[in-house]
Amino acid sequence: MAALGEFELIAKYFSRPARRVPLGVGDDCALLAVDPGMQLAVSTDLLVEGRHFLSTVRPERLGHKSLAVNLSDLAAAGAAPLAFTLALALPRADDEFLAPFAQGLYALADRHGIELVGGDTTAGPLAIGITVFGQVPAGGALLRSGARAGDDLWVSGRLGDARLALEVFRGNVSLPGTAFEELRLAMECPEPRVPLGLALRGVATSAVDLSDGLAGDLRHVLRASRVGATVEVQALPRSAVLAAQPASLQHECLLAGGDDYELLFTAPAERRAAVQAAGAQAATPVTRIGRIEAGAALRFVDGRGTELALAVRGFDHFA
Ligand code: ADP
Ligand code: MG
């Protein structure tokens, strides 16, 4: 099949007319509007082959994940998605990649009512940069800095499956095919928790999305909020497949895993019913996993409250 030119490929795959925003793809800038009393929430994530995804990933799943990791940041802020831009570096402009990639991207975009409004396209090693725009009531965004001593610590969904899938890809763990497919779906098709983020507005005191492992991402919240925390490791929600692994591997996947794209958030202990109601409204499981404390220490404890000596760190590209 003949390769496409730059403008041909933009026209063919990335020029769907915008319906909700004032101006979409095709001019020098897109134009966005937020509702009165709202602030614009903006976030960018860059995905590079070999770093953030493996060359074996199916293009439709890559399209999904590229947008999902960005929507996850809007979710963590409690923002409603509006629009996104797509910067694409491609080794080749071929339909075999672009058609399913665009399909996966638009399928997720349509489910969240978010529109592609612009971007940039260049030849180069495969990399995907997306910027998302959302809106949140002025002063009402969920921040990392709002956790207070005495708050409960909560997490959505379950943790560690994406990291366990990576261990299978690396050849460190072997699993039956069906179990592997389940984990692989968690790694390649994360579900951004946008409805939960919206439902937690006015309930959660702080929130962060888990992209680099709970231990590292929680430390960001603790530092920003100037507090400490105790995490009950046994309470961390996990799949049956992960629960069947040795304890040390479970801890690694649950706490230092990365690629979970669940929300970690805090709320006052008096708001437990409101948090449960937010989870129910968003059809997203929520689990209480610990509490925020005065001081700056992060402690991991077992079911009896005995401290566990775990040397887990969050992911750092340059460490
Ligand atoms: P400029 O030279 O002004 O940067 P381009 O020629 O790069 O414009 O792009 C033309 C139009 O196509 C612009 O509206 C731009 O936002 C859009 N565009 C380019 N690449 C993409 C892409 N991958 N996805 C969506 N829109 C794109
Ligand atoms: Mg350009």
Image (cartoon, rainbow, N blue to C red):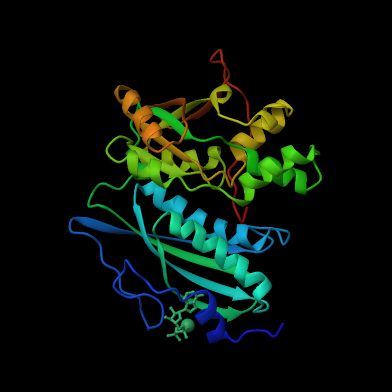
At horizontal 35% and vertical 75% (from top left) the residue drawn is 30
Residue 154 x %, y %: 44, 31
**In this view of the protein, which residue sits in the foreground, 57 or 60?**
60
Residue 295 x %, y %: 40, 29
Rendering quarter of residue 293: top left
Position of 274 with respect to 50 (left or right) is left
User: What is the quadrant of the N terminus in the image?
Assistant: bottom right
Residue 264 x %, y %: 45, 38
Position of 159 with respect to 85 (left or right) is right
Residue 193 x %, y %: 45, 44
Indicate whether 76 appears above or below 135.
above
Q: How many marks?
A: 0
Indicate whether 46 appears above or below 221.
below
Indicate whether 20 appears above or below 180.
below
Rendering quarter of residue 206: top left
Rendering quarter of residue 177: top right
At horizontal 64% and vertical 78% (from top left) the residue drawn is 124
Position of 39 with respect to 83 (left or right) is left
**What residue occupies the far top of the structure in this picture?**
304
